[in-house]
Every structure is written in structure tokens, then in C-alpha cells.
Amino acid sequence: MLILSCNQILIQNLLNRIADVLAEENRAIAAEGVLQSNINAEETARISAVSNEATLRTNADSTLQINIENEASTRLANDNTL
């Protein structure tokens, strides 16, 4: 009976360790999923921010160029009136 009891304890301990490993694996997989989701969201946000900044810079450059051309045109017109 004592040997059977020791074997049962050993088997139960083994089953408990297997359950612990599986629980840790499931926890790690879930945590990695959250981390990957956060990485994906951050990547999307950075891409959007860079795209928005590029659009703003392009628009500002266009406005500056229009202002330069208007100023040049005004100067030429005023030079002709002198």
C-alpha cells in the first residue's frame, strides 16, 4: 500500500507540474497577444502621424510657394508703375 501511495503522490505531483506548465504557457500566449496588439496599434498610430505631418508640410510648402509667387508678381507690377 505504501508503494502505491508513493506512486500516486508522484503521479499527482507530475500532473500538477504539467498543469502548472500549461497554465503558464496559456498566460504567456495571452500576454504576447496583448503585446503584439499594442505594437500593431502603435505602428498604425506612428504611420498615421508621419503621413499627417507629411501632408501638413506639403500643404505649407505649397502655401509658401504661392506666397512667393504672389509677392514676385506684386513686385513686378509695382516696378512697372514706377
Image (cartoon, rainbow, N blue to C red):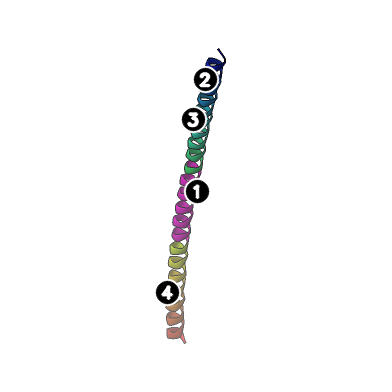
Q: What x and y, as percent, mark residue 68?
A: 45, 74
Quarter of the image with the N terminus is top right
Name the kind of residue labelled 1 in the image.
Answer: Glu
**First reached walking from the N terminus: tag 3 or tag 1:** 3
Q: What x and y, as percent, mark residue 37?
A: 48, 41
The residue tagged 2 is: 7
The residue tagged 1 is: 42
Front tag of 2 and 4: 2
Q: Nearer the viewer, residue 68 or 33?
A: 33
Q: SS class of the residue under badge 2?
A: helix
Q: What x and y, as percent, mark residue 30?
A: 50, 35
Q: How crowded is mark 1: few (under 14 residues within 10 Å), some or many (20 or more)?
A: few
Q: Residue 11 carries which label?
A: none
Q: Main secondary structure of the magenta part?
A: helix
Q: Which residue is drawn at 46% across and 55% down?
A: 52
Q: Which mark is residue 22?
A: 3
Q: In this view, does 2 lie to the left or right of 61?
A: right
Q: Which residue is drawn at 51% across and 22% down?
A: 11
Q: SS class of the residue under badge 1?
A: helix
Report the span colored magenta. 37-56
**First reached walking from the N terminus: tag 3 or tag 4:** 3
